[in-house]
Amino acid sequence: MTAPFGPARLVNLQLFSRPVALRAVGKGKARAVSCLVVAAGLMLPPGSLLASAPIRVVVTNPLAVPRPNETVAVPSGAATALSTTSLPTLAVVDASTGKPILSQAVDSDGDGKPDTLVFQSSFGPGETKIFLLEPGKRAPYRKEDFRVYGRFVRERFDDFAWENDLVAHRMYGTALETWQQEPLTSSTVDVWCKKTSRLVINDWYMVDDYHRDNGEGADLYSAGKSRGNGGSGIWKDGRLFPSKNFRLSRVLAAGPIRLVFELIYEAWDAAGTRVSEVKRVTLDAGSRFNRFESFYESGGVPLAHAAGLKKAAVASVKTDRPSGTIRTWEALKGDNGNLGLALVVDPSSLSEIVEADGNVLAIGNPSATRPAVHWAGSAWDKGGEIRTVEDWDRAIADFARRVRSPLKIEVITE
């Protein structure tokens, strides 16, 4: 199967999108440009804005609440100087302080060309900030700049593991299906519990003692054959049809701010329909939520995407269809605290919420053309930030509010 490397630009972790007017201002004139703003980013065709230098990016928080560690995404082609070749050389400077800000040129679709410039900043209620984009001045990255990481782990029976400064996950590859000691066929999303901002994946695999908390957290959650924390499948005739383990993987963007990777699943049978999938996963530094985007091939047959959370016997479950959210909160075994999981979907694409095979599932409206998108996140009450289920509910509501009300971004050339 060929991965879906079309012209669409993924420019930020997206849930909802809406048409807005992005104003490109230059040389005494301005014009409105039709585009999409999603979360803290925007989606528009390259070359659509006026070209001249210097370039200013004006970003406004439309909410009356703070937005800490928000990702701002500027696409290549937003000005002549923002070409796919120049994007990796650009330095981002906070205009109010003159201080440089860490940035990353991201190839979101795997075509070998950077298509988005991302950086992060915190915004107060209703605050507007101005950033300068300076060609040819980006400093080399340092190891300590990286707050996201992911890789294929052949030595652990083909896992793909990934993390940021708050959360860590893994999904299962081919070799685990035939492991003699404990074979597992599952396209679930596993959760590792972290209480350090340090990137730990390599160290935990190397020491191979990650099922015990040695001070930084551990693998304390059992996803098994469930959907875990955002696993998905096809919903047909009242049943869930998940894939087997992934067959191939590749990293499209490796940080330091944004991680993007793809997992490829070979065709499986969904009640008589042959389905294959490329799953694209995006995680930003400082975010508890992964964005999952599934590109299905089904020979033109409309498919209903089902994404969900494992429903443990001891879990407290909360669903809210108007906001498109599902939340669980469960006690982990032993003296290991509680783990909260969350799933978020666009309410306009949600058909129903059901329970099946030990999961709570959000069922999407059938489609044969558009990719299926959902978000999933986690929080451990020993991780330091989220202490109670009420804290977790507030964090989920805040996340949904922020993506429904994206930052307003204006690119100005003079």
Image (cartoon, grey):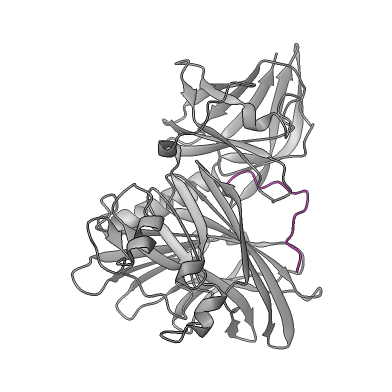
Against 382, residue 108 (above or below) is above
Q: Which residues are magenta?
A: 1-12
- Please give the name of the residue rendered at 45% of the width and 44% of the height, measured from the top-left corner: 285
Q: Is residue 5 magenta?
A: yes
Against 184, residue 63 (above or below) is above
Decide which of 359, 101 is in the foreground and name it.
101
Q: Determine whether, in the image, residue 132 is placed left or right of residue 414.
A: left
Our reading of the magenta stretch's main secondary structure is loop
The location of residue 112, given as percent across then percent down, is: 72, 46
The location of residue 292, given as percent across then percent down, is: 57, 60
Question: On the image, which quarter does residue 272 sit in?
Answer: bottom right
Against 315, residue 406 (above or below) is above
Q: Determine whether, in the image, residue 351 is placed left or right of residue 69.
A: right
The location of residue 166, given as percent across then percent down, is: 37, 51
Quarter holding the C terminus is top right
Decide which of 111, 324 is in the foreground and name it.
111
**Residue 107 in sight in this render:** yes
Quarter holding the N terminus is bottom right
In the displayed image of the protein, which residue is found farthest to the top?
28
Q: Determine whether, in the image, residue 93 is placed left or right of residue 342.
A: right
**Residue 229 in sight in this render:** no
The location of residue 210, given as percent across then percent down, is: 31, 65
- Please give the name of the residue rendered at 51% of the width and 23% of the height, measured from the top-left corner: 129
Q: Is residue 75 magenta?
A: no
Q: Determine whether, in the image, residue 174 is placed left or right of residue 209.
A: right
Decide which of 113, 278 is in the foreground and name it.
113
Question: On the image, which quarter does residue 407 sit in?
Answer: top right
Against 91, residue 296 (above or below) is below
